[in-house]
Image: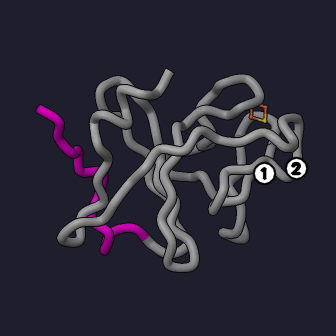
Amino acid sequence: MSEYHEICLLADLPDPGAVGFEVDGVGGFVVRRGGALHGYVDRCPHTGVPLAWAPNSYLDAAGELLQCSLHGALFLPDTGECIHGPCLGRFLTPLPVLVEDGRVLVHEDDLDDVD
Ligand code: FES
């Protein structure tokens, strides 16, 4: 039977802000910016490393772009497209998330689809 996993409470996620998680062996994160939420697999398209330089630190200093800690690639929060750095033009892998009753959720079927 399929089920959802709770990542965090929406109220605990600042805007802008991000939170990392690991469920069923899949590392991911959710970014909130401008009222929108987007989920991604926590894997840089350059070398495959997790992006954050510290727990939940996915955004740049301005809180506008996602930034990889290893070589500084910058990604658009809304699309996951790399707009600066060694993986220019490539995309983070999206991971659908939804909000229900104030909880940010990810569905285990979407985690199963991650390579
Ligand atoms: S590993 Fe992310 S920019 Fe190189």
Mark 1 Cα-neighbour bin, 10 Å: few <14, some 14–19, many ≥20: many
Which mark is on residue 74? Answer: 1
Reply above or below: 49 against 96.
Answer: above
- State the residue at coordinates (21%, 45%): 4
Which mark is on residue 84? Answer: 2
* Image coordinates for residue 65, horizontal then vertical, percent: 71, 61
- State the residue at coordinates (17%, 36%): 2
Q: Residue furthest bottom?
A: 34
Give the left or right position of residue 94, taking residue 89 as reference.
left
* Image coordinates for residue 102, horizontal then vertical, percent: 23, 71
- State the residue at coordinates (66%, 24%): 48
For numbered disc 2, what is the local secondary structure?
A: strand
Q: Nearer the viewer, residue 78 or 57?
A: 78
Looking at the image, what colour scheme do you see?
Answer: one colour
Looking at the rendering, the stretch of residues picked out in magenta corresponds to 1-13
* Image coordinates for residue 84, horizontal then vertical, percent: 88, 49
Mark 2 Cα-neighbour bin, 10 Å: few <14, some 14–19, many ≥20: some
Indicate whether residue 2 is drawn in magenta.
yes
Looking at the picture, which amino acid does disc 2 mark?
A: His
Give the left or right position of residue 58, taking residue 60 as reference.
left
- Quadrant containing ligand 1: top right
